Image: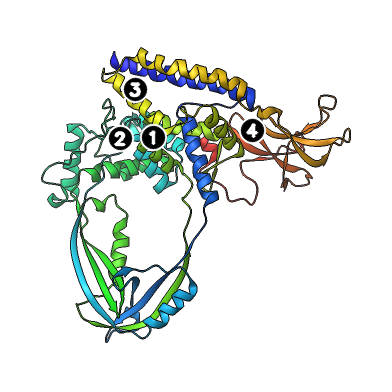
Amino acid sequence: MNLVNAQQARRILDRLVGYTLSPLLWKKVSRGLSAGRVQSVAVRLIVEREDEISKFNPEEYWDIEAELKRKGDTPKEKFKARLDKYQNKPIEITKHAEAEKIVSALKKENYVVGDIRETKKRKKPYPPFTTSKMQQEAFNKLRFSSVKTMHVAQTLYEGVEIGGEGSVGLITYMRTDSVRISKEAQDEAKKYILEKYGKKYYPEVPNFYKSKKSAQEAHEAIRPAVPLMEPNSIKDYLTPDQLKLYTLIWNRFVSSQMSEALLAQTSVDIKAGDYLFKTGTTRVVFDGYMVLYDVDVEKEEEKEKKIPLLSVDEPLDLLELLPSQHFTKPPPRYSDGSLVKALEELGIGRPSTYAPTIQTIVTRDYVRRESGYLRPTELGGIVTKLLMEHFPKVLDVEFTARMEDELDGIEEGDIDWKVLLKSFYSPFMHTVDAAKVAMKDVKKEVIPTDEVCEKCGKPMVIKWGRRGKFLSCSDYPRCKNAKSITSGVKCPSPGCEGELVQRRSKRGMFFGCTKFPICRYTTRKLPGKDEVKDEVKDEV
């Protein structure tokens, strides 16, 4: 009953927030909008990140690299080292003139190998997937949106027709935050690893992974339902997307049961008078689990070829000094993967909520995808500002995370669910009543324009409506002329003289021709704009 009560409390809290705030937004901003305990916090994170980016001032800095070679080697055997210190203190170069001065000084110095340090590093395999980790990796490695990842995973879970075997469920349940796996699955993985790779690729003691404290252990980690069913053996029965995701899940699970990798790291100091350069290489001694999962093996082997075998006090020849200008970069926009990671780390939402949350905020046009990353719209900024002003507690990250902890406390029998709901309900409804009066009515705001109404000659103004901003005659309601705001992009349909305007449907934003219904051209992105490759059609 503790589990039941926790579920009831979660559902009631979500409905209290969603069913109360959404109608308020309909009244004050536009119909069709929504707010929620998790989604509104997610939008806030994206809006605040965009604010950080817009306020960011890039700062100039310079790096200096030296191209060096051993005495007697040919220039083809050169390697690079980066300037790191001056008189044993970290060096920071912020101006071009400063970089030129240091380069002039370095040209006069002799280059000698200083300290050489070699260390062995053990790299442990990653645990099998939880829902959030699968979504993150699917975005990072496959560029799948969260919704697409969960849709493809659902088809793998429900079953795929495999030859004469009929429908076969290929993975375990895909909504989980546990890294636990069954003894049977572990035994099958062991059998496969020993047969395929040999004893050295299987650890002396089977790998065990501990779930985080708040994890619900009702389901295993996401793993192949039949671990010995290799991706290549069933690739003819899977769609390209199914094969990609199944391969990712299969490799992650099998590699999680393999031996750790062993890397040899070499760090080299190179002295040039009072200046110190650093270089290094990483060599894979034993690939272990990386034979299946980690893609860094080739990169590490590439690095190894660039650094020759050096010895302490060995003199080196300077071939060239390479100063390079850089600028500090703002924090990146959130992607599906990084937003899921942030929500998980902040303790907001559950594995089953991440993909629907992202889908909702995109559909509501609070955020849009640009080149695979999430950028807030003007609407998203307005809604977030209004909610932050009147409901700071609901949008407070710490409050939302603490609420998740208290819901977990109901599961454990430590908190009474009715007491929790009462403690939230009274102050929340008091705030709602105050917001109904005090919240700014965006609908009534008008923005003047230079455009003139073609029907009555009065100025046109910009207003907010059900489908976002639109142009309306300032003499409304006597003149009811209204039209969409054009993007300024000509309709590419042959012979059409219309322009593309932004429109919104239940499936999200799109662009349509002003000559509709004569011209029915529609597109998810403006022609010539490099928007998302994340398949909006799959998203909706």
Residue 153: mark? 1
Q: Circle 1 sits in a helix, a strand or a loop, which is it?
A: helix
Residue 447 in the image, given as x and y percentages of width and height: 73, 37
Q: Disc 4 and disc 1: Cα gap in Å?
A: 29 Å
Seen in the picture, residue 410 relative to 111 is either above or below; the reply is above
Residue 310 in the image, given as x and y percentages of width and height: 22, 76
Q: Circle 3 sits in a helix, a strand or a loop, which is it?
A: helix
Q: Nearer the viewer, residue 373 or 95?
A: 95
Q: Amino acid at mark 3?
A: Leu
Residue 432 in the image, given as x and y percentages of width and height: 54, 20
Residue position marked by numbered label 4 in the rendering: 504
Q: Disc 2 and disc 1: Cα gap in Å?
A: 10 Å
Residue position marked by numbered label 3 in the rendering: 407
Residue position marked by numbered label 2 in the rendering: 222
Residue 90 picture quarter: bottom left
Q: Amino acid at mark 1?
A: Ala
Residue 199: mark? none
For label 3, count other residues whose C-alpha is less than 10 Å away and answer few (under 14), some (14-19) or many (20+): many
Asked whether, in this view, residue 331 is left or right of residue 190, the answer is: right
